[in-house]
Image: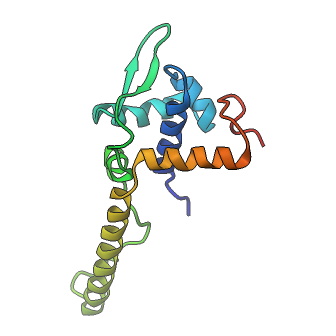
Amino acid sequence: MRRDSKLSGVLHVLLHMAEAPGPMTSEDLGRVMQTNPVVIRRIMAGLRDQGLVHSEKGHGGGWTISCDFNDVTLRDIYEALGSPEIFAMGNRSDAPGCLVEAAVNTALSGAFEDAEALLMERFAGVTLAALSRDFHAGMVQNGSSFNLNTVHAE
């Protein structure tokens, strides 16, 4: 089963944008993320609507960050993406009158709700600034510097 990596990808894009000296085009971000610029534009539109990024058209335009990394959490980004489904698992609803199905669904629903609440709590506790600090600590530990053209080189 394929996993939805949109949240991870958006966080990746935002950290790259924070390192860029100026606006980054959808094409630039598409190269970084190894995806089509149209995908980037779709994703970024939700962030723009939430005031997290800004876009300028034309020569010299592109995407820029318009939020304070200290104030924005993983939960904020998750919600800006439309709060995608967290679990691929779900309750069966083929036989609504079946008491076995009802008992199973009740047990699973509680577990799913508890797990989602814990995840949202954790997301709310991690800021973009913390991710950026972790990234920079890794750069220092590896003795490397950020270069947008070679950051993904192996």
The quadrant in which the N terminus is found is bottom right
Q: Position of residue 77 (x, y in %)?
A: 37, 46
The quadrant in which the C terminus is found is top right
Residue most toward the bottom?
100
Q: Work out whether residue 3 or residue 21 is closer to the camera in this orientation and state it.
A: 21
Q: Work out whether residue 67 or residue 12 is closer to the camera in this orientation and state it.
A: 67
Residue most toward the right?
154
The answer to whether residue 113 is above or below residue 70 is below
Tell me the residue at 43%/25% (across/down). 64
Tell me the residue at 39%/21% (across/down). 55
- Tell me where residue 92 sits by quadrant: bottom left
Q: Is residue 12 visible?
A: yes
Q: Where is residue 72 in the image (x, y as percent from the top left)?
A: 34, 44
Left or right, 137 with respect to 103, comes to right
Q: Where is residue 90 in the image (x, y as percent from the top left)?
A: 37, 72
Q: Is residue 93 visible?
A: no
Q: Work out whether residue 88 or residue 148 is closer to the camera in this orientation and state it.
A: 148
Left or right, 85 with respect to 25, comes to left
Q: Where is residue 149 in the image (x, y as percent from the top left)?
A: 69, 28
